[in-house]
Image (spheres, rainbow, N blue to C red):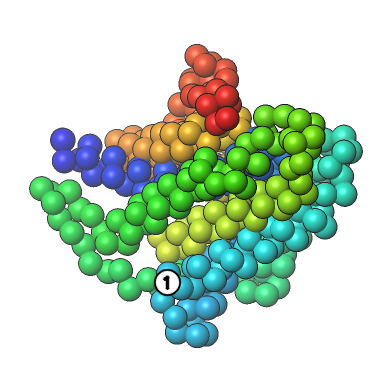
């Protein structure tokens, strides 16, 4: 029984780490700019498809292909901010909401047009399976956990230890004061969208390697991301990290000990229960400041 618990804990942490990457991208955009970027899931799938294309066409490995896809994703995020969201920055929130929904459809259809309708599994070459005390650790899942952990640490250092990170936090805390201090809000907005999209692409690549990249996957991914966003606390980076892992582990335990058909239901019931007890989420937003 203990082995089964440890096994499902590991599986849940792997899935939860992907949810965390998705939620972090949504968190920094919503927490800093107040935009619900529903197209985030479609951007993630674009990154997965693009990584598969690079591997198949140029014969490069997973990590170089993923790095290039993340760079392209960051550029796409900057373009989306400039073209779609920047013009309505001072408009009522409903404007950005409608644009976000429209972008979701546009990017989703563009993925279908460019990459086709077939689902693809990103080849990795990580086929070994480790067994430690009866706990099965597939090499791919170990790498996924490591990649996600690396990206989370790198983003945390970037936000907390660099000049641009300080500018981002300043805008999040008090935009007018940040402007008076000489911070270029336009630059911060572009940086936030670029960083968010790069994290989304990374999540899409990991989903494609572990499961598959396919039409329709983006919707479920972004729903889970917003669930984590709410569960962890709106705008809280530590909350997004903890919330993603909690959601992933709860799904794994639900699949193993109840039924895979109810894993989403049980996970969201857990989220609702947490919010009933603590409406502001697991961590208040001020923990991110």
Residue at 69 percent of width and 57 percent of height: 77
Image location of residue 151, percent across then percent down: 45, 52
Is 195 left, or right, of 261 in this rendering? right
Q: Residue at coordinates 32% horizontally, 47% vertically from top-left?
A: 11
In the displayed image of the protein, which residue is found farthest to the left? 133
Element at label 1 = helix
Q: Is residue 34 above or below residue 112?
A: above
Quadrant for the C terminus, please. top right
Query: Does the image show residue 130?
Result: yes
Q: Residue at x 84, y 42 (%)?
A: 89
Q: Quadrant of residue 127?
A: bottom left
Looking at the figure, which quarter contains the N terminus?
top left
Q: Position of residue 263 (x, y in %)?
A: 42, 38
Q: Is residue 139 above or below residue 94?
A: below
Identify which residue is drawn at 67% across, 52% down. 191
Quarter where residue 24 is shown = top right
Q: Which residue is mark 1?
A: 62
Q: Which residue sits furthest top?
A: 277
Q: Nearer the viewer, residue 223 or 257?
A: 223
Looking at the image, residue 174 sits to the left or right of residue 235; the answer is: right
- Total marks drawn? 1
Q: Is residue 189 left or right of residue 139?
A: right
In the rendered image, residue 210, in percent from the top left (x then y), is placed at 40, 60
Crowd tier of the residue under label 1, counting other residues whose Cα lies within 10 Å: few below 14, some 14–19, many 20 or above: some
Q: Is residue 60 left or right of residue 24?
A: left
**Does the image show residue 214?**
no
Q: Residue 36's spot in the image, x, y percent?
A: 70, 40
* Residue extending farthest bottom: 58
């Amino acid at each position: 029984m203990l082995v089964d618990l440890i096994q499902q804990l590991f599986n849940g942490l792997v899935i939860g780490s992907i949810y965390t990457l998705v939620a972090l991208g949504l968190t920094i955009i919503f927490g800093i700019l107040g935009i619900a970027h529903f197209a985030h899931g479609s951007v993630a799938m674009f990154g997965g498809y693009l990584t598969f294309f690079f591997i198949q066409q140029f014969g490069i490995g997973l990590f170089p292909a993923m790095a290039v896809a993340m760079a392209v994703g960051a550029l796409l995020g900057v373009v989306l901010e400039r073209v779609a969201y920047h013009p309505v920055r001072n408009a009522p929130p409903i404007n950005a909401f409608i644009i976000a929904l429209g972008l979701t459809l546009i990017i989703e259809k563009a993925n279908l047009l460019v990459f086709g309708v077939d689902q693809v599994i990103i080849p990795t070459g990580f086929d070994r399976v480790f067994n430690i005390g009866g706990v099965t650790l597939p090499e791919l899942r170990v790498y996924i956990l490591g990649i996600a952990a690396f990206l989370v640490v790198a983003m945390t250092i970037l936000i907390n230890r660099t000049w641009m990170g300080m500018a981002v936090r300043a805008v999040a805390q008090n935009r007018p004061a940040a402007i008076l201090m000489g911070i270029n809000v336009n630059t911060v907005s572009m940086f936030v969208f670029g960083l968010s999209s790069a994290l989304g692409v990374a999540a899409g690549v990991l989903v494609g390697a572990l499961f598959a990249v396919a039409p329709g996957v983006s919707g479920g991914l972004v729903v889970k991301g917003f669930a984590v966003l709410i569960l962890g606390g709106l705008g809280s980076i530590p909350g997004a990290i903890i919330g993603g892992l909690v959601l992933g582990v709860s799904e794994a335990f639900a699949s193993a000990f109840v039924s895979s058909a109810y894993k989403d239901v049980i996970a969201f019931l857990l989220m609702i229960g947490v919010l009933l007890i603590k409406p502001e989420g697991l961590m208040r937003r001020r923990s991110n400041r």
